Image: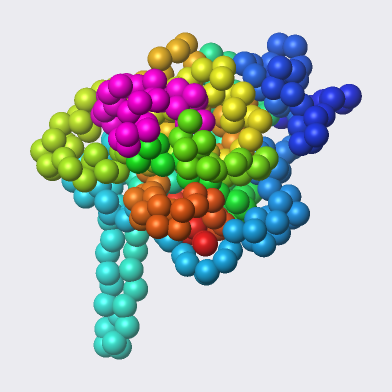
């Protein structure tokens, strides 16, 4: 684990300025290792202070309307993106009583998911958040106990809870305003198209949505809307293309700066959040997960959320997400609700 860093200059939000990253000479690209101590397991989730959560609840919960952002666990019944194990359910009749149990088997990233800090490391350095190695993650001690370092169970103590903001990029891009202002004249959810941060900011402005430090970001790229228009054969054909190709958030210094300056977690409606495969020599997954400990959400179903936001005329809300308490888990269904 990375040792804590002393003498860090913090800004008004209680974090170093982006230009001061990495915090130590020789650490990987833009990393913030040691910011919260060498044994930290929460990363960006440290930004979700009790006060920020209380302010979010007070400011965002008005009607009590709840919207699920969870795609069904069995939403990919035939083939899956990234060749992950499909969801399987077995219902067990407990004869002779009128009682049933069931057993579930699935990959934790086969549907809506939070990527945990064990998922993706810096590829050149082969290191995860705070300098954790593959050996650390796969270690088994003399008594047979498996290492749980950076496991997603650490998030379950307080969950991912706070003010959420939807950027309905798909809705804006296909509008008259978006068609006139977007830097992308064409967008295909199943091609490697990069969404620039300038477009995301223009969408926020059109929505009239102001960001607050520590917000939880949701980007509706249009993937779910596009997916629903495809036949089973078309979806299978996309799933067989390796590497997969997805439109998503652009890999750039501007994107990294924007995320660092504003959010506690980021999520989107497509399988990789960022444009895939990466258009640079590095990926957002490396810096966000391994460098900063910023949770990345993927395959969030944002269709009903976007509809309700349009109806209400506001794109901020309260978010409550409780990942599964799996010691040493790599990822988890988010079990997430948006509350208005």
Residue 67 shows in the view: yes
Residue 281 lies, with reference to residue 148, above or below; the image says above
* Residue range corresponding to the magenta coloring: 174-201
Q: Position of residue 82 (x, y in %)?
A: 31, 33
Left or right: where does residue 270 sit relative to residue 13? left
Q: What residue is drawn where x is 51% and y is 36%?
A: 205
When asked about the image quadrant of residue 161, the answer is bottom right
Looking at the image, which residue is at 80% across and 30% down? 11
Rendered location of residue 283, percent (x, y): 48, 21
Q: Nearer the viewer, residue 340 or 46?
A: 340
Indicate whether 281 appears above or below 117: above
Which residue occupies the foreground of this view, 325 or 288?
288
Which residue is depicted at the point 29% across and 43% down?
224
- The colour scheme used to paint the residues is rainbow
Q: Looking at the image, is 340 positioned above or below residue 166?
A: below
Residue 116: in sight, yes or no? no
Q: Any magenta on residue 79?
A: no
Q: Nearer the viewer, residue 134 or 171?
A: 171
Return the x and y of residue 278 as percentages of the image width and height.
Answer: 41, 19
Left or right: residue 130 versus residue 308 is right
Q: Is residue 181 magenta?
A: yes
Considering every residue shown, the one lying at the far bottom of the view is: 97
In the rendered image, residue 230, in percent from the top left (x then y), is placed at: 16, 40
């Amino acid at each position: 684990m990375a040792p804590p860093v002393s003498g860090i200059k913090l800004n008004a939000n209680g974090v170093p300025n982006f230009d001061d990253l990495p915090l130590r000479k020789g650490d990987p690209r833009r990393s913030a290792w040691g910011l919260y101590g060498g044994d930290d397991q929460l990363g960006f989730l440290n930004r979700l202070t009790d006060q920020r959560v209380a302010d979010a609840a007070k400011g965002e919960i008005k009607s009590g309307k709840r919207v699920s952002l969870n795609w069904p666990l069995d939403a990919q019944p035939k083939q899956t993106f990234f060749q992950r194990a499909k969801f399987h359910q077995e219902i067990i009749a407990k004869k002779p009583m009128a009682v049933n149990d069931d057993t579930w088997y699935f990959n934790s990233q086969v549907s809506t998911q939070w990527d945990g800090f064990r998922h993706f490391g810096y590829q050149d350095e082969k290191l995860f958040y705070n300098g954790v190695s593959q050996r650390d993650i796969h270690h088994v001690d003399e008594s047979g106990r498996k290492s749980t370092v950076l496991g997603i169970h650490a998030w379950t103590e307080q969950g991912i809870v706070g003010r959420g903001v939807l950027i309905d990029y798909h809705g804006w891009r296909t509008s008259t305003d978006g068609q006139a202002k977007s830097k992308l004249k064409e967008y295909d959810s199943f091609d490697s198209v990069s969404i620039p941060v300038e477009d995301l900011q223009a969408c926020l402005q059109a929505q009239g949505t102001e960001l607050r430090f520590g917000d939880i970001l949701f980007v509706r790229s249009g993937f779910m809307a596009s997916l629903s228009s495809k036949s089973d054969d078309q979806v299978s054909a996309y799933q067989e293309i390796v590497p997969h190709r997805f439109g998503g958030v652009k890999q750039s210094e501007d994107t990294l700066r924007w995320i660092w300056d504003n959010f506690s977690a980021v999520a989107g409606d497509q399988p990789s959040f960022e444009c895939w495969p990466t258009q640079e020599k590095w990926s957002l997954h490396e810096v966000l997960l391994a460098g900063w400990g910023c949770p990345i959400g993927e395959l969030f179903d944002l269709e009903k959320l976007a509809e309700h936001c349009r109806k209400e005329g506001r794109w901020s809300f309260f978010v409550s997400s409780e990942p599964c308490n799996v010691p040493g888990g790599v990822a988890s269904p988010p079990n997430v609700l948006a509350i208005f």
